[in-house]
Amino acid sequence: MKIGIIVHSQTGNTLSVAQKLKEKLAAAGHSVNIERISPVGVDKKRPVQIEKLPDLSVYDALVFAAPVQAFSLSPVMKAYLGQLPSLSNKKVACFVTKAFPFNWTGGNNAISHLKKGVGSKGGNIIGTSIIHSSDKIREKETADMLEKFSKLF
């Protein structure tokens, strides 16, 4: 299966988890590419514009990954979701990374944004995960997500 991991990563934490997922899925025999979503310039007075939109039609399945920022999904991924093409009948998994281990710090809100954006384009959400940046928690949550997502595709 050809899988695209569409990731926005500001500090590199989300990208590092995406790279581990790529390795796990590739070891299971899938063809996997990471496509980074980057903004064009950062101007808080103007809407976020995406540098380059990846061609999602070449993938059989997708994983969307982004950080939680200000208790919500990153503005860059929110802007990208607004520009998604049809995802009709594509399997989609999503994960977010966040700094704080508390439930009330935006992870569920960010996942809800991802599910709503993907669902509005016809994608079939098959799994989600929230990964905290705290070293003690991150390794276990990342390992759990890798195991869970590797069984989805």
Image (spheres, helix red, strand yellow):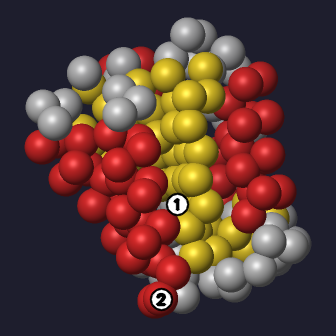
Where 126 sits versus 54, above or below? above
Image quarter for residue 94?
top right
Residue nearest the viewer, comparing 75 with 102? 102
Residue nearest the viewer, comparing 108 with 80? 108
Tell me where residue 147 appears, x and y as whole percent.
35, 49
Tell me where residue 99 appears, x and y as whole percent.
64, 83
Circles 2, 1 touching at the beta carbon (< 8 Å): no
Which amino acid, mark 1?
His
Image quarter for residue 30?
top left
Sequence order check: which comes first, mark 2 or mark 1? Answer: 1
Element type at marker 1? loop
Which amino acid, mark 2?
Lys
Label 1: few (<14), some or many (≥20) within 10 Å? many
Please give the name of the residue rendered at 12% of the width and 31% of the height, measured from the top-left corner. Answer: 29
Q: Is residue 64 left or right of residue 18?
A: right
The residue labelled by disc 1 is 8
The residue labelled by disc 2 is 136
In the displayed image of the protein, which residue is found farthest to the bottom?
A: 135
Q: CA distance from mark 2 to mark 1?
A: 23 Å
Tell me where residue 60 appears, x and y as whole percent.
36, 19
Where 75 sits versus 3, above or below? below
Residue nearest the viewer, comparing 128 with 85? 128
Res. 44 in view: no
Tell me where residue 82 appears, x and y as whole percent.
74, 38
| Dot in front, 2 or 1 | 2
